[in-house]
Amino acid sequence: MTRLFLGLPAPAKLNLFLHVLRRRADGYHELQSAFVPIDLADTLDFELRDDGAITRSGDIVGEPQMDLALRAARLLQLESGTKRGVAINVDKRVPAGSGMGGGSSDAATTLIALNRLWRLGWPRAKLASLAPRLGADVAFFLGTGPAFVEGIGERVTPIEFPPAWFAVVRPQVAVATAEIFADPGLTRDTKATIISAFSAGLAQFPRALYGANDLEAVVRRQVPEVDAALTLLSRFGAARMTGSGSAVFMAAATEEQAREAVAQLPDGWTGWVVRSLKHHPLAEW
């Protein structure tokens, strides 16, 4: 019986656009976005335990009990009724609070790995039914690759997206997502788009990016460092904030253009040259 899965990736994502359509009666916001996974990733190790215990080691951000990999393992154990446990180790490379979905990706990789390690045999759709109880982006990371995402993140439609280079920058600052969505200046009435309109807009990529990130104006006003990062990247190409920030990205025509942009970062900022992934690395699991 398999007892170890080592070095499984949990890739980050970028929001190519993010539209806020309305505030729902339940307090959540109805969103539309296009997500692409990128080759910046956390790495997770899993070791089977026969005593039913679930443990977490490695890089932990914030309160341990709120860690999404840990929560995903506990939820799957509860819902499946398995008596098996696991020791999880996470090597973090995707910064928390960057808008790149690192915690949600860790949760998805955990569900995928434990479905095999615990020999549950759940179809991917059944795993995805747990996603809303963990986080808005988890459903996407349980998918196959680039996707058009709607609702609060639970409706995921695969799309074709050409391999692309990006310069990604994270100024050393945190953005409180709840505060951004609560800001009275946030636009909440963007007209709904359709997948075909987004796909047609890709003809302009990377010279231009489709739509907008409706959270960006609020974050730029509240967080000067994000505004400065977008201003810097805009000198090199079409730039946008991902998610609710604080990371921003520039769509590059070439790897060299992306490297040129990252080379201009001030001290204390973190930057990466990344490539989009055509498929999630665990899509066939």
Image (tube, rainbow, N blue to C red):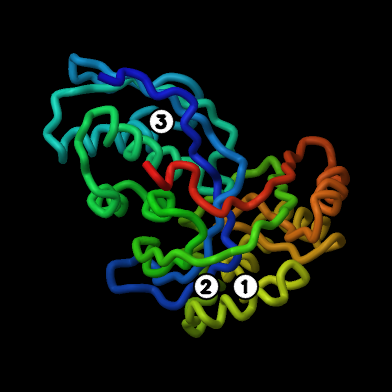
Q: Earlier in the sequence, mark 1 or mark 2?
A: 2
Q: Nearer the viewer, residue 256 or 236?
A: 256
Identify which residue is drawn at 63% across, 60% down: 219
Identify which residue is drawn at 58% across, 68% down: 17
Disc 2 target residue: 19
What's the amino acid at mark 2? His
**Please, is residue 76 above or below residue 188 in the view?**
above
Quadrant for residue 52, please give it.
top left
**Dot 2: what SS?**
strand
Quadrant, the N terminus: top left
**Dot 3: what SS?**
loop
Alpha carbons under labels 3 and 2: distance apart = 30 Å
Please say if the residues under marks 1 and 3 sit with CB atoms less than 8 Å apart.
Answer: no
Please say if the residues under marks 1 and 2 sit with CB atoms less than 8 Å apart.
Answer: yes
Disc 1 target residue: 212
Q: Earlier in the sequence, mark 1 or mark 3?
A: 3
Alpha carbons under labels 1 and 3: distance apart = 33 Å
What's the amino acid at mark 1? Ala
Identify which residue is drawn at 40% across, 38% down: 109
Packing grade of label 2 (10 A; few <14, some 14-19, many >=20) is many
**Dot 1: what SS?**
loop
State whether residue 51 appears in this view: yes
What's the amino acid at mark 3? Glu
